[in-house]
Amino acid sequence: MDIKEVKKFTQNLNILYVEDDLDIIEHVTPILQALFSAVEVCHDGQKGLDTYNSYFKTFNKYYDIVLTDIEMPHINGIELSKQLFNINPEQHIIVISAYNDKEKLQELLSLGIDDFLHKPVESESFFKTFLKSAKKVNEQLNIKEELSFTQETNQNLETLLDIVNQVAIISKTDLEGKITFVNDLFCNVSQFKKDEILGQDHSIVKHSDMPEAIYKHIWEDIKAGKVWRGKLKNKTKDGESFFANANIFPIFDKHNEISEYIAILFLTTEEEVKNREFKKKVLNQYQESKRNDFKSRKMIDDLERELKKFKNYEQLAFSLQLEKDNHIKCQNQLMATLQNYTQLKKKYDKYVDEVKSKISGIVGEAKSEGTEEEGLTNISESKTMPPNKKKLEIHRLKESISRLNKELQDLENAQG
């Protein structure tokens, strides 16, 4: 037996295994885990039933396959199978047992189990049984999927027809052209009541001005599975004329055979156009609402993307605040330096003035007695100040002025 062939049908399924023999569980469980996407093991019938119900509550679906022994504590395999079928009549159950009781086997088969395995199980029989059961499950799943798709498609068609029904004249006919359905707008325009028009030939609204060749062409197209589009002139019950843009096409059944025909007409007369204007506005408002909803969703997505760019904005704001604080600190230091510079400048200017005054006094005194050198010589002879001391004083004052000039220059350079 090709295990890959079995796994092709079982790999997406899940199974509930109910067995009280631990040795059998230890032997069978790894094989099941290799075949199925999920395996749940229970050691008695009651636990198996509880697990089955819990699984449905959690996932809103049942186990695809249940493998159960017959003789178990609390609830045996027969009773468990009965309760499972009461819960889900479509449940697939395989029974495995060491006993070959024909009455029990007959009872299980009458319940509707898929198959019966006798312990000890041969590998060939084991895999064939699960292949057969898994194929059934997959067929049912495919049918349900197709049914769900068909229902969704029909629902979408009903929604579309409901919208079209508000603005179009709609009628259906059988393969012979007998009317089987008309909408309210058809009755309003044609002036026929439904019980007057149903079962009648569609030619009841045919206008005598329309050439026969047109209708011959219509029947040729729709019988061939094509859609016919064109303008038609029809008549009401009272013989009045109305014009319409017509779309007539066949409807196919599941065997791809034509089962009926449908005609969707849009009036072109000015009066009827006005009568449909409000319904068109409703349809336009609906479409505009859908567009606005799309725009709103797009705007939300764009804003969320922009927000992600600034997800670290708090950290950025903190860093910015630190930079601001450092800037303020530097400004304060600059102001303090400027104030120190101003004070030092004033002090320097004052000191220069004092030094200049002292030097002027000394020089003036020297000049009054001759040249500067002679004056210094004379001053050296003066009793008020020794000559060497006056020279040192002058030298000290010049050095002070030079030093203050340098400090002031350094401060100005630093300030610049």
Image (cartoon, grey):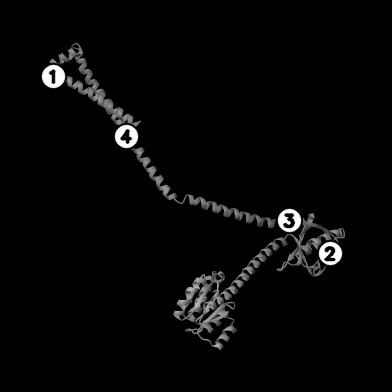
Q: Does the residue at mark 4 contact the one at mark 1 (Cβ under 8 Å)?
A: no
Tell me the tag on residue 203: 2
Identify which residue, 124 or 307, lies in the foreground. Answer: 124
* Quadrant of the rendering where the C terminus is positioned: top left
Tell me the tag on residue 277: 3
* Quadrant of the rendering where the N terminus is positioned: bottom right
- Residues at marks 2 and 1, CA–CA distance in whole angstroms: 149 Å
- Residues at marks 3 and 1, CA–CA distance in whole angstroms: 125 Å
Q: SS at mark 2?
A: helix
Tell me the tag on residue 337: 4
Q: SS at mark 1?
A: loop
Dot 2 or dot 1: first in sequence order is 2
Residue 332, horizontal then vertical, whole percent: 34, 38
**Picture residue at 24% right of the left edge, 21% below the top:** 356
Q: Amino acid at mark 2?
A: Ser
Q: Does the residue at mark 4 contact the one at mark 3 (Cβ under 8 Å)?
A: no
**Picture residue at 20% right of the left edge, 14% below the top:** 372
Q: Amino acid at mark 4?
A: Thr
**Which residue is disc 1 drawn over?**
386
